[in-house]
């Protein structure tokens, strides 16, 4: 009779709880990703040397921090725990869907030894099609504007009807522009 070898049950990856940040994470994230750029990424073939590291638009949403990070290898929407209700600890590599003012977006959990747990929504990766930092900044600022825009629009008061009209940036329109398509 053959003896069965028992395999240990697969355990889910450990979850390291996020330490909430009380202060704006912009400078902290920029310093971290600049260090990664200078020490580990600079010579890799998929980076865009026309870009550098910048963080834009970090602001609180339901008590947590949400903003965009530009690097020579990605342009991502990042969620950082601020002690609010938007954040939820999940294992690195897991995905979750968050209801934001613009609608529902998918975020992927990660856990960096230097910055701790964070979650990101990839916007552009690789960033080889971005010609320069000016374009990357425009995309980042459009993303922030889109993410924080509410889906329902309220009518403007009659006194603003004659003001210069700017077209609303819809979520679909934003992502279509990222893909290089026209409305």
Image: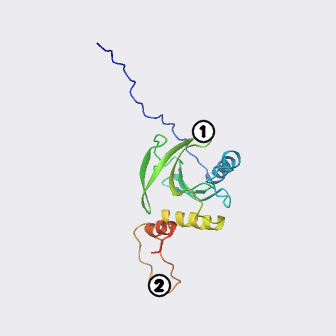
Q: Nearer the viewer, residue 128 or 8?
A: 128
Q: Is residue 84 left or right of residue 133?
A: left
Q: Is residue 70 left or right of residue 1?
A: right
Q: Which mark is residue 83?
A: none
Q: Is residue 106 left or right of residue 27?
A: left
Density class for disc 2 (Cα within 10 Å; few <14, some 14-19, many ≥20) is: few
Q: Is residue 76 above or below residue 12?
A: below
Residue 129 position by quadrant: bottom right
The spot of residue 169 in percent (x, y) is 48, 71
Q: Nearer the viewer, residue 65 or 33?
A: 33
The residue to which callout 1 is attached is 113
The spot of residue 122 in percent (x, y) is 51, 55
In the picture as drawn, the residue positioned furthest to the right comes out as 38
- Given this view, does label 1 or label 2 mark the residue nearer the observer? 1
The residue to which callout 2 is attached is 161
- State whether residue 86 appears in this view: no
């Amino acid at each position: 009779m053959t003896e069965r070898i028992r395999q240990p049950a697969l355990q889910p990856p450990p979850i390291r709880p996020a330490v909430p940040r009380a202060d704006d994470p912009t400078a902290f994230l920029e310093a971290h990703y600049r260090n990664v750029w200078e020490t580990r990424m600079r010579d890799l073939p998929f980076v865009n040397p026309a870009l550098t590291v910048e963080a834009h638009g970090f602001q609180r949403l339901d008590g947590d921090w949400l903003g965009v990070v530009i690097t020579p290898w990605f342009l991502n929407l990042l969620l950082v725990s601020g002690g609010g209700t938007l954040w939820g600890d999940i294992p690195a590599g897991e995905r979750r869907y968050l209801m934001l003012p613009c609608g529902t977006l998918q975020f992927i959990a990660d856990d960096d030894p230097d910055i701790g747990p964070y979650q990101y929504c990839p916007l552009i990766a690789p960033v080889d099609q971005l010609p320069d930092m000016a374009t990357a900044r425009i995309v980042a600022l459009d993303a922030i504007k889109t993410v924080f825009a509410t889906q329902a629009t309220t009518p403007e008061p009659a006194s603003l009807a004659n003001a210069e009209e700017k077209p609303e940036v819809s979520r679909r329109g934003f992502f279509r522009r990222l893909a290089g398509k026209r409305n």
